[in-house]
Amino acid sequence: MSARAERSWGGLLFVAPFLALYALILVYPLFKGLWLSLHRVDLFGGGSFVGFANYGRLFADPVFLQSLVNTFVVTLMIVPVLTVLALALALALNRATRGAAIFRGIFFSSAVLSVTIVTLIWRFILAPDAGLLGELWTALGWEPLPFLSHPDLALPALALTTIWWSLGLPMLLFLAGLQQIPEDMYEAAALDRASRWTTLWRVTLPSLRRTLILVIMLQTAAQLQLFGQSQLLTAGGPSGASRTAVLFLFEVAFGRWELGYASAAAEILFLIILAVTLIQYWLTGRKGDADGR
Amino acid sequence: MTAVSGLQIRNIRKAFKEVQVLDGVDLDVAPREFIAFLGPSGSGKSTLLRIIAGLETSDGGEVILDDRRIDPLPPGERGVAMVFQHYSLYPHMTVRENMAFGLRNAKVARAEIDTLIADAAQVLEIEPLLDRKPGQLSGGQRQRVAISRAIVKRPKLFLLDEPLSNLDAALRLRTRVELAQLRQRVDAGVIMVTHDQAEAMTLADRIVVFNDRRIQQVAPPMEIYARPANRFVAQFVGSPAMTIIPATLADGGAMAAVTLGDGATVQTEVPRAALKPGEAVELGLRPETVRVCRDSEGTTRGTVQLVERLGERSLVYARLTDGSAITAEDEGTTAAKVGDEVGLRIDGAAAHLFGPDGTGYHRTAA
């Protein structure tokens, strides 16, 4: 064996454990999913090849299409509000005072809770009969809103819960981004007579552009996969009004045992997320090329 | 009170927590004067610059520019422009936008902005760069853009915070010349913070030497060099540093004579009247006033510790017989070697004396 070949094999040995794990838990399932989506198959093995029949069925399935629409709507409700709120909090808390540190901790704390706890908390808040909001509405003399049982209110309820739960990470990313902006940039702006508003729009926000793109892309990809809140808070109801795409494929896979059909739904969702992410990247990525310092 | 133009600084004090940085600083700067703030790190020179700019608040005192008290005003309304050490250009704006930003905020008419930018760009030769972003520029180009951004604002006073420290040696020399030319074209005063004495010496009309919370001396460059106010200024300005040797004042004569530790006597031209007889003083000697000579011809003698050959001249670091260190100068082709015993001829006429409190005494001005 030549020295060159020996060297490359030696290198391969170092990455082999990672490659093996990567292949086993990422590459294999990816292709297995693709394979499953082309078969009629249940949990007890076997299965017959059906070509694109599963996909054909999906596009004719009103429940699936409804779940896709719900997913887009809830994502559109969550991502802009979440981004703006997280940015506002980061701007307010980007200072070295003790108070700011405490509030950063408080606002981040919800992010460490599991989805079970989060939905439990929000059930207490949203429940119309004895919930916090219900009590408040009653105290103000209004009729309590049936957040969890009205078709028009279930998705906003999911969005509200998710925003509260997810605020921590984007806030942290924005804080990290803000701390990258050198202090003398603000000093230059002060000498340039920039008002606070001008400084925010012309100095701070352009400097946060990369962070902003990152937050929006991460949150879009995450919220298109929204699942736990939908399952635990409303169980997708009432009558599918808050069923998300992942909840749909969970029900199909583990309720009806139609693994092939569920895999086809998963592949479609995967392609949608990929496309949305790439479009965002394409829309925002090119202009930034010249922005290097 | 009559109208006084230029900058007046009155009794400025500043402390960061318990650390006093500036302690009652006064300074007058004439209109169109180029002033260099020179001093070691932590001497308060940058803090004073930032107080003038309004980026730092003082704990007390006044800053007056062209007869208007500016220290209560926000930075943008003081009539000053600053060039930052790291340029601080806005990375997402083009060069043109960087220059226009302050003018737009000041509600200057668009046509006038364009004229001002065109003029400044021409003076600093950055016209081809106007539509680029700072990330696409070299260090020297960024420096010019930073200066242009200050110029278009037509300030009464330019504040430069170590403007050359980020450039490499060759570019620094060139920019130094450019800065000197620039100040001829602008109708404004300039204050430049630096810790590089060559910059201060070559550019400034007057140098302000800072140390230990206070201004040590304010004077034209050559006076700072030839008549340092005290021991600190004498040692801080000049490279290599002035030799300081303990000495005793000898009796008699109108001009002071001092005896060194090794018994040698140096006749200076410092008037004796200023000093008390028998007082312990220190003798200050610039390297160029001590020459290496043959053993028999010297004022005193020393053992060579180190020879630095600089080309046109050599610096000889030696020790006198009592152990005091002394720096002497010799020809570029010096024969002195480490360990040699050499004669040292001291030019007493150019010597300085320092009293016990560090105050400098010099020969009467010519």
Image: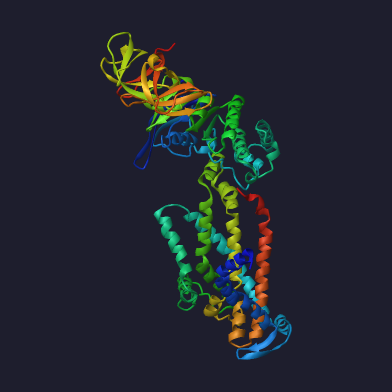
Rendered position, A71 above or below A239: above
Q: Residue at x 57, y 57 (%)?
A: A211
Does residue A1 show up?
A: yes
Chosen colour scheme: rainbow
State which quarter of the image contains the N terminus of chain B: top left
Between B108 and B14, the residue placed more toward the observer is: B14
Q: Residue at x 66, y 30 (%)?
A: B123
Instruction: Measuring from the top left, give residue A7's x and y in whole percent.
Output: 60, 64
Left-right relation of A254 to B344: right
Left-right relation of A114 to B282: right
Instruction: Measuring from the top left, give residue B137's x and y in whole percent.
Output: 64, 42
State which quarter of the image contains the C terminus of chain B: top left
Instruction: Measuring from the top left, give residue A191's x and y in whole percent.
Output: 54, 39
Does residue B220 show up?
A: no
Q: Please count the marks in the image.
A: 0
The furthest residue to the top: B253
Instruction: Measuring from the top left, give residue B4's x and y in whole percent.
Output: 49, 22
Between B314 and B170, the residue placed more toward the observer is: B314
Rendered position, A43 above or below B250: below
